[in-house]
Amino acid sequence: MKSDAVRNELIEWISKLEDQGLLGSLLGIKKATQQADWAETLSSEERRSIERGLDDLKHGRTTTSKDFWERHGR
């Protein structure tokens, strides 16, 4: 089925929908597809910080949550 045909079928179906839950879900999908990728909004410093964290992970420079909290008094 071509895109135009699918689009028209969906438009017709949505225009007749009464189910508020389903309409809300469809609206959520619409909003999710229109949002910019959060990674594109990062500053260069934030990107460098993420890269440092990934490098730490790659080289085993990590600690468990349990060890962290034991060292910091929790």
Image (spheres, grey):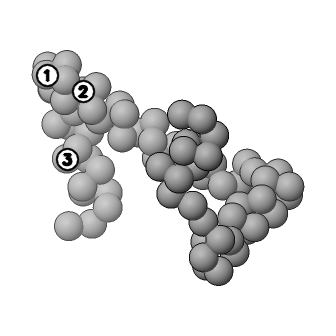
Spatial CA span between label 1 and label 2: 6 Å
In the rendered structure, which amino acid carries the disc numbered 3?
Answer: Glu
Image coordinates of residue 19 in percent, x first then y, are 13, 22
Query: 71 or 17: which is nearer to us?
Result: 71
Q: Residue at x 29, y 35 (%)?
A: 26
Q: Is residue 29 left or right of residue 64?
A: left
Element carrying mark 2: helix
Q: Which mark is residue 45?
A: none
| Position of 27 relative to 59 (above/below) | above
Image coordinates of residue 70 in percent, x first then y, are 54, 44
In the rendered structure, which amino acid carries the disc numbered 2?
Answer: Leu
At label 3, counting other C-alpha atoms closer than 10 Å, the crowd grade (few under 14, some 14-19, many 20 or more) is few
- Residue contact between numbered discs 1 and 2, judged by CB atoms under 8 Å: yes
At label 1, counting other C-alpha atoms closer than 10 Å, the crowd grade (few under 14, some 14-19, many 20 or more) is few
Spatial CA span between label 3 and label 1: 17 Å
Q: Which mark is residue 9?
A: 3
Q: Which residue is mark 2?
A: 23
Say which quadrant the N terminus sits in: bottom left
Q: Is residue 12 visible?
A: yes
| Position of 71 relative to 73 (above/below) | below
- Residue contact between numbered discs 2 and 3, judged by CB atoms under 8 Å: no
**Total marks in image:** 3
Q: Which residue is mark 1?
A: 19
